[in-house]
């Protein structure tokens, strides 16, 4: 069972949260868009597989937990929207019609990585196997990363 780590940070797993609705505790990586049903993050397994395959470029943000992911000659990303054009929010009332669109850019929240995936991410980064868009290198480090001492 998936429980989005960002839901826990928001306190939205608690029974008294205004963002909680019945059944909302069972987060999923949606079949339609492979994204977290709570926070909209790309599926971490997909994120890691695309990094390994070299079919994405990353763009750092001013947040230590967020990165943009650009398609680099791989499969399109998908995002599921409500048909009234508001972005998909897992805590929203789910009684709307939905539409799924292809996208070239997605977002990823590092909280979704397992400990093993964080280690592998750092390995890939140290080996310079992670591609960044121009000027997209991390200027705020991922929260689980530390700068090594130079020799
Ligand atoms: Zn999430």
Image: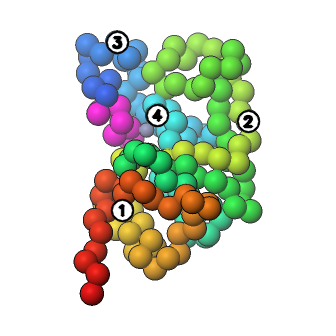
What separation in Å lies between label 1 and label 2 (alpha carbons)? 29 Å
What separation in Å lies between label 3 and label 4 (alpha carbons)? 16 Å
Q: Secondary structure at mark 1?
A: helix
**Do the numbered discs 1 and 2 sit on residues whose CB atoms are within 8 Å?**
no
Q: Which residues are magenta?
A: 1-9
**Do the numbered discs 3 and 4 sit on residues whose CB atoms are within 8 Å?**
no
What separation in Å lies between label 1 and label 4 (alpha carbons)? 19 Å
Q: Secondary structure at mark 2?
A: strand
Q: Which residue is mark 4?
A: 39
Of the two numbered discs 3 and 4 on the same chain, state the one appearing first in sequence. 3
**Mark 2 residue crowding within 10 angstroms, few (<14) / some (14–19) / many (20+):** few
Q: Position of residue 76 (x, y in %)?
A: 72, 50
Q: What residue is drawn where x is 63% and y is 40%? A: 33
Q: Quadrant of residue 56?
A: bottom right
Q: Nearer the viewer, residue 19 or 124?
A: 124
Where 81 sits versus 142, above or below?
A: above
**Mark 4 residue crowding within 10 angstroms, few (<14) / some (14–19) / many (20+):** some
Q: Which residue is mark 2?
A: 101
Q: Which residue is mark 1?
A: 118
Is residue 36 in view? yes
Q: Is mark 4 within 8 Å of ligand 1?
A: yes
Give the number of the disc on residue 18.
Answer: 3
Q: Quadrant of residue 27?
A: top left
Q: What residue is drawn where x is 43% and y is 46%? A: 62
Q: Secondary structure at mark 4?
A: loop
């Amino acid at each position: 069972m998936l429980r989005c780590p960002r839901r826990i940070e928001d306190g939205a797993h608690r029974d008294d949260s205004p963002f909680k609705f019945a059944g909302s505790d069972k987060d999923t990586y949606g079949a339609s868009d492979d994204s977290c049903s709570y926070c909209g993050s790309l599926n971490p397994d997909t994120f890691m597989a695309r990094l390994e395959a070299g079919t994405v470029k990353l763009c750092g943000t001013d947040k230590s937990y967020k990165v943009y992911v650009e398609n680099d000659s791989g499969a399109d990303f998908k995002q599921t929207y409500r048909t009234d054009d508001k972005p998909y929010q897992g805590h929203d009332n789910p009684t709307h019609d939905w539409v799924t669109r292809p996208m070239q850019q997605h977002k990823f929240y590092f909280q979704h990585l397992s400990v093993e995936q964080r280690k592998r991410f750092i390995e890939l980064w140290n080996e310079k196997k992670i591609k960044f868009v121009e000027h997209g290198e991390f200027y705020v480090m991922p929260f689980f990363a530390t700068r090594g001492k130079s020799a």
